[in-house]
Image: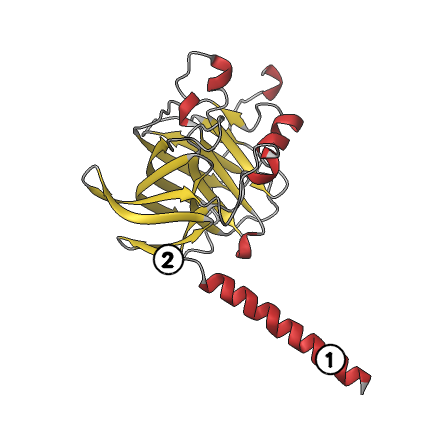
Amino acid sequence: MERTKYAGLLFSILISSLGAVAQSKANYKSLHLGKHQFELHNVTGVITNFQGKEVLKIERDLVSLPFDSTNIEATVDEAHYAKLVGLEDFENGTIVVEMYSQLQNPAPYSGVAGFIGIYFNIQPVDTAFEGIYVRPKVGRSNNQLFRNHAVQYISYPHYKFDTLRKIAPFKYEGSAPVALNEWIRMRIEVNGEIAELFINDAKYSSFIVDKRLSNNKKGSIGLYVDIGTIGYFRNLKVTKRALKVKTVVGENVNKI
């Protein structure tokens, strides 16, 4: 009798948990822009006309995911993004989007920098993902140290920006010619362990992640903003490709 009761209790808990997950997924607001459908994760969003074109506009939702200025590392680089629905198996290839970053006024935090970019390799229920984003406010700063923080790679949950600065200073950050209040064309090339960032049709990448930090290599794609940013996105294009094997002849890394 006790065993039967225990089994029934476990069954009830399982059903409740599954119901909670299903309900959580059902509660994601969904938006359509052209042929793309986006699912909003801890961001508010609308499809709006901006500078004569239909765009996706998103801002971080501080109600569903609060920000704590006294505990920045724990409350940024989280699951605040618009997920592209229907593409859960992106592994290698190209992600391109045009994005425009504005600062909220008044700013909710003094350190806002227009954080905007792309999440990829997103796992179910947001348990893990990777991202490359930019801080347009410092992209053309007169201070080179600030410029060197214009691009950021992260791998959630273990390697957010502050952790990476401590364990590998500037290895996962870099500079890029970006600025607030102008369109930025961001292209990310993912190829196995490598992810490269190209800005505004540049021939060569501005930034490279030569060893990705995630154990997962396949997942969904999302458009990201963080604290204090109003982000506009248009012309998202994703192209999947097979892994490219690259060989470099005559390279001697010891010279670097």
Residue sitting farthest toward the right:
2
Q: Is residue 204 visible?
A: yes
Query: Considering only order in the chain, which callout, 1 or 2, is on the residue closer to the N terminus?
Result: 1
- Quadrant including the N terminus: bottom right
Q: Which label belongs to residue 188?
A: none
Q: State the residue at coordinates (58%, 20%).
A: 252
Q: Is residue 165 left or right of residue 233?
A: right
Above or below residue 238? Residue 254 is: above
The type of residue carrying mark 1 is Ala
Above or below residue 232? Residue 63 is: below
The type of residue carrying mark 2 is Ser
The residue pinned by badge 2 equals 30
Q: Is residue 8 left or right of residue 192?
A: right
Q: Nearer the viewer, residue 37 or 86?
A: 37
Q: Position of residue 57 (x, y in %)?
A: 33, 43
Q: Is residue 158 left or right of residue 83?
A: right
Q: Quadrant of residue 167?
A: top right
Cα separation between marks 2 and 1:
38 Å
Report helix, strand or loop for mark 2.
strand
Q: Which label belongs to residue 7?
A: 1
Q: Position of residue 227 (x, y in %)?
A: 47, 36
Report helix, strand or loop for mark 1.
helix
Residue sitting farthest toward the top:
142
Residue sitting farthest toward the left:
52
Q: Quadrant of residue 98?
A: top left
Above or below residue 241? Residue 163 is: above
Q: Position of residue 256 (x, y in %)?
A: 58, 16
